[in-house]
Image (spheres, rainbow, N blue to C red):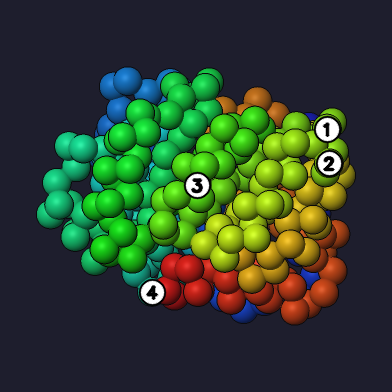
């Protein structure tokens, strides 16, 4: 959200946002009084419940959303599932699970609209699980038709390349792999990400510009352009609202208005915002 005193960001979209456009990466936090945060969390956010998220999407003109479980709630997916059930036609979800998650909970989440699981490999957020845990989770959700979402950073894309290729299910890479922008599009991690996109099971989110660079986010644009060109039917976009662990305030309208800079053709924006998330999430 925009901070007081920050230069005024555009209050409206600078392009025609297609009907039923999807924020394919956003979060709900709490409210903690109803949905407590995980005891072992690495950060404690301010509450950002489903009503706040819905208001943001009305402002941006977005008709659909994929709500991604955040690490501050751990494997307690109740806040995310509650948000899905409040608007089942227009919301889907991505859960976090572990070996203790009952099969009945997986079935319940599927009925609510969950279509994937996520593992976080960011060291500052506690790092990832043992590979055996990830593979057991993949085996459990594969029969449901779910996919795997991986939150990696830079060289983590290279380190996980063999695992990604061997999962035998759709895999979505968050936030353009959070590569180091100073290395450019020829950096080894980004070249690995582009090579992964030759596999039709691999998807990537053209989000996270605010984690790569400061406003006006120009340094992130070459990466988004290259990924869209590599796999125009397997790219997604999201706000990452409410930007957990980000020190600099961000206005989501500014992020939305980056889209024409890397997807100038209306057809590409239709795929990115509507058709691709509908295909992966079953809207």
Q: Who is closer to the viewer here, 134 or 89?
A: 134
Q: Nearer the viewer, residue 165 or 116?
A: 165
Q: Residue at x 50, y 74 (%)?
A: 279
Residue 75 position, x and y percent, is 29, 38
* Distance CA(mark 3)–CA(mark 4): 30 Å
**Are the residues flagged by discs 1 and 2 in contact, CB closer than 8 Å?**
yes
Nearer to us of marks 3 and 4 is 3
Report the front residue among 92 and 175: 175
Q: Nearer the viewer, residue 167 or 66?
A: 167
What separation in Å lies between label 4 and label 2 (alpha carbons)?
Answer: 41 Å
Secondary structure type for disc 2? loop
The crowding category of the residue bearing disc 2, from other C-alpha atoms within 10 Å (few below 14, some 14 to 19, many at least 20), is: few
Q: The C terminus lies in which quarter of the figure?
A: bottom left
Please identify, in this view, whether the residue under mark 4 or under mark 1 is nearer the observer.
1
Q: Which residue is mark 4?
A: 89
Q: Is residue 140 above or below residue 100?
A: below
Question: How far across and down, in percent of the image, does residue 81 sit?
Answer: 30, 54
């Amino acid at each position: 959200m925009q901070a007081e005193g920050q230069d005024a960001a555009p209050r409206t979209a600078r392009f025609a946002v297609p009907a039923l456009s999807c924020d394919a990466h956003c979060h709900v936090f709490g409210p903690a009084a109803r949905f407590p945060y995980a005891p072992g969390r690495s950060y404690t956010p301010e509450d950002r419940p489903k009503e706040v998220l819905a208001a943001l999407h009305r402002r941006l003109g977005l008709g659909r959303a994929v709500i991604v479980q955040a690490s501050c709630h751990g494997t307690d997916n109740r806040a995310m599932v509650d948000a899905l059930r409040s608007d089942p036609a227009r919301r889907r979800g991505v859960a976090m699970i572990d070996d203790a998650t009952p099969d009945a909970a997986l079935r319940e989440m599927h009925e609510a609209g969950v279509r994937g699981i996520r593992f976080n490999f960011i060291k500052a957020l506690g790092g990832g699980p043992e590979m055996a845990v990830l593979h057991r989770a993949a085996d459990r959700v594969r029969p449901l038709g779910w996919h795997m979402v991986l939150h990696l950073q830079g060289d983590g894309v290279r380190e996980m390349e063999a695992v990604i290729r061997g999962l035998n299910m759709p895999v979505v890479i968050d936030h353009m792999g959070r590569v180091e922008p100073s290395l450019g599009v020829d950096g080894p991690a980004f070249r690995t990400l582009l090579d992964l996109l030759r596999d039709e099971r691999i998807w990537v989110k053209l989000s996270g510009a605010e984690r790569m660079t400061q406003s006006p986010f120009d340094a992130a644009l070459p990466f988004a352009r290259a990924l869209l060109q590599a796999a125009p039917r397997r790219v997604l976009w999201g706000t990452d609202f409410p930007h957990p662990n980000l020190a600099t305030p961000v206005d989501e309208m500014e992020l939305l208005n980056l889209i024409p800079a890397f997807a100038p053709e209306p057809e590409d924006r239709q795929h990115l915002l509507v058709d691709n998330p509908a295909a992966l999430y079953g809207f």
